[in-house]
Amino acid sequence: MNEKLLYPLAEHHPERLRTPSGLGFEDLTVDALLEGRASMDDLRVSAEALCMQAEIARAAGRRQLAENLERAAELTRVPEDEILRIYDALRPGRSTRARLEELAAMLERRYQAFRTAALVREAADALPQTGGNGR
């Protein structure tokens, strides 16, 4: 992006923000919700907004925050039940290396969530060779 982005996006770049369904940020109003032109899903953050925030964080020298925001952008494509299943698998003693590798491959294949898959693989690599109880 050529333009330097400023935080908060809603104040400095509202015209660039869109809801997950494509509704303009400034068009997201209580009236739009009441009239059915917007839905509760429109209240969720979009992957594009998270990527813009990541760009701002990276420009400010906050690399780790930028990486977290980029992973969050990927996760907007993943259903909540899948996220909860992955979260549970990442808890200590819940999974084997093989199970975490399976989840990482699924993230890549189904959702193109490559950054998140790499994080899951990093967790798998941190397990002892015997790796959890295999749940």
Image: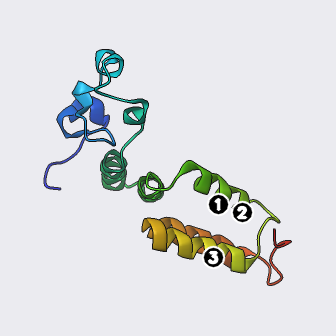
- For residue 48, side relative to residue 116 (left or right): left
Above or below — where is 110 with respect to 55?
Answer: below
Question: How many residues crowd around disc 1 within 10 Å: few (fewer than 14), some, or many (20 or more)?
Answer: some
- For residue 117, side relative to residue 16 (left or right): right
Q: Which mark is residue 68?
A: none
Kindly identify the amino acid type of the residue bearing the numbered disc 1.
Answer: Ile
Q: Which residue is mark 1?
A: 86
Above or below — where is 22 with respect to 38?
Answer: below
Which residue appears at 30% of the width and 18% of the height?
35
Q: Position of residue 135 (x, y in %)?
A: 81, 68
Which residue appears at 32% of the width and 28% of the height?
38
Q: Nearer the viewer, residue 63 or 36?
A: 36
Q: Which mark is residue 89?
A: 2
Kindly identify the amino acid type of the residue bearing the numbered disc 2.
Answer: Ala
Which residue appears at 80% of the width and 65% of the height?
94
Query: Which structural element holds mark 2?
Result: helix
Q: Position of residue 77 (x, y in %)?
A: 44, 55
Q: How many marks?
A: 3
Above or below — where is 108 with respect to 84?
Answer: below
Q: Which residue is mark 3?
A: 102
Kindly identify the amino acid type of the residue bearing the numbered disc 3.
Answer: Glu
